[in-house]
Image (cartoon, grey):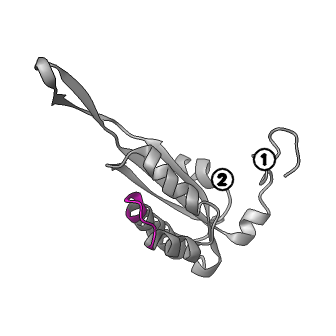
Amino acid sequence: MSTTERSRTSARRESLLGDQPGAFASARYVRITPMKARRVVDMVRGLPVDEALTLLQFAPQAASETVYKVLESAVANAETTEGLNRADLVLSVAMVDEGPTMKRWRPRAQGRATRINKRTSHITLAVQPADALDAKPGKNARANKNGRGA
């Protein structure tokens, strides 16, 4: 089903992809800190899908396994629902948001206790065809934010 045949678009898809072709996947309440997950996501943002999957497969970070699974799911969504070719997909949107924090207590000396924060993450990845990214306006908005060239 293409984007022109789509009868109703979710607000989540609209905010991530707009009217461009592509698909997304997300993993919520993942028990890894957002800071550690962002390190992994920053490595693969903007890469072609096959290259990103290879990089994630051999990355030593613990979050790379979860990001790998989410990326595989986004690619599968793009192939089945949008009918896109896997070879020309690029990881366009990759973000890690903070989920709820579980608060635990650890006993310390002299009857005191300190708090242990067990943080969770919401990982969202979106893939788009490479040609759709080239036509997107404002592609280098981050690079030209200061008024300087890239």
Instruction: Tell me if 14 is positioned left or right of 58 in this view.
Output: right
Neighbour tally class for label 2: few under 14, some 14-19, many 20 plus, Cα within 10 Å: few
In the rendered image, which residue does mark 2 sit on? 18
* Residue labelled with disc 1: 141
- Tell me: residue 128, above or below residue 54: above
SS at badge 1: loop
Query: Residue 112 at x, y = what percent?
Result: 16, 19
Which dot marks residue 20?
none
Select label 1 or label 2 by which is in front. 1
Would residue 6 be seen by someone viewing this image from the given angle?
A: no
Q: Is residue 45 magenta?
A: no
Q: Position of residue 60 (x, y in %)?
A: 42, 65
Give the Cα distance between marks 1 and 2.
Answer: 17 Å
* Magenta-highlighted residues: 58-65
Element under disc 2: loop
Q: Quadrant of residue 102?
A: top left
Give the side of residue 107 with respect to residue 67, left or right: left
Q: Which residue is at 56% across, 77% downward?
A: 50
Residues at circles 1 and 2 in contact by the CB criterion of under 8 Å: no
User: Which residue is painted at 70% across and 70% down in the image?
Assistant: 130
Neighbours of disc 1 within 10 Å: few (<14), some (14-19), many (20+): few
Q: Amino acid at mark 2?
A: Gly
